[in-house]
Structures are given as structure tokens and as C-alpha cells.
Amino acid sequence: MYDKGNRDEFFKVTSKMWTSNEETVRKLEFELQVYFCIYNIHPNLKKQHTMDHASSVAFKKYLDTKAADLALSKEELSLFAMPYMLKPQ
């Protein structure tokens, strides 16, 4: 799932394990959302030259529904623009 870029299947399985709303868990989920968003354009994979539309939409939805408070961190703030760029690399 993870190594194949299958976001839906991965989160379907792992969401059952993440019952906590701790900051560490939320940051891990954010980093995983970023990973799946850029999976197709990752330099080591070179599957596509632009981000996958479905991945971009899923990441936007995640940002709108679950990650608003993470925008307060400088580290994560720049990643909030990523789904709006065609070639974020």
C-alpha cells in the first residue's frame, strides 16, 4: 500500500490504529498525506511530471478538513500551497 502509493487503502487500514489526537499522530498523518500527494512526482520514482489530480484533490480536502491548525508551523506552512501547483518540484 505505502510503497505503491495507494493512499485510500493505506488510510483505510491505518486509521483504525490512530485513535489518538496527539500532536505527534497529527504530524505523522500530515507527513503521510504529503507523501501520497507527491508520490507520482517523487524524484526517485519519476512516474509523472505533474501531480496526479486525484492526489491533489485528496490533499486539498485533507488540508481543508483536518490540518488547519498545522498551518501555524513554519515547517508545514509552505506545503499548504503544494496542491495548487502543477509542478511543485
Image (cartoon, rainbow, N blue to C red):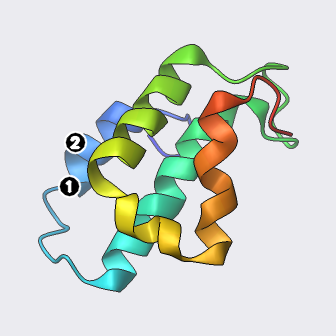
Q: Judging from the image, what secondary structure is the residue with disc 1 in?
A: loop
Q: Amino acid at mark 2?
A: Lys
Q: Is residue 46 left or right of residue 40?
A: right
Residue 21 image position (x, y, % from top left): 19, 76
Q: Secondary structure at mark 2?
A: helix
Identify which residue, 71 or 56, lies in the foreground.
71
**Residue at left offset 44%, top offset 69%:** 70
Residue matched to label 1? 15
What residue is at 57 percent from the left and 16 percent from the top? 53
Q: Residues within 10 Å of mark 1 (few under 14, many from 20)?
A: few
Residue 60: x, y in percent?
A: 45, 35
Q: Residue at x 37, y 58 (%)?
A: 67
Badge 2 vs badge 1, beta-carbon distance below 8 Å: yes
Residue tagged by mark 2?
A: 12
Quarter of the image where one finds residue 6: top left
Amino acid bearing label 1: Ser
* Spatial CA span between label 2 and label 1: 6 Å
Residue at the image position 20 percent from the left and 55 percent from the top: 15
Can you see residue 65?
Answer: yes
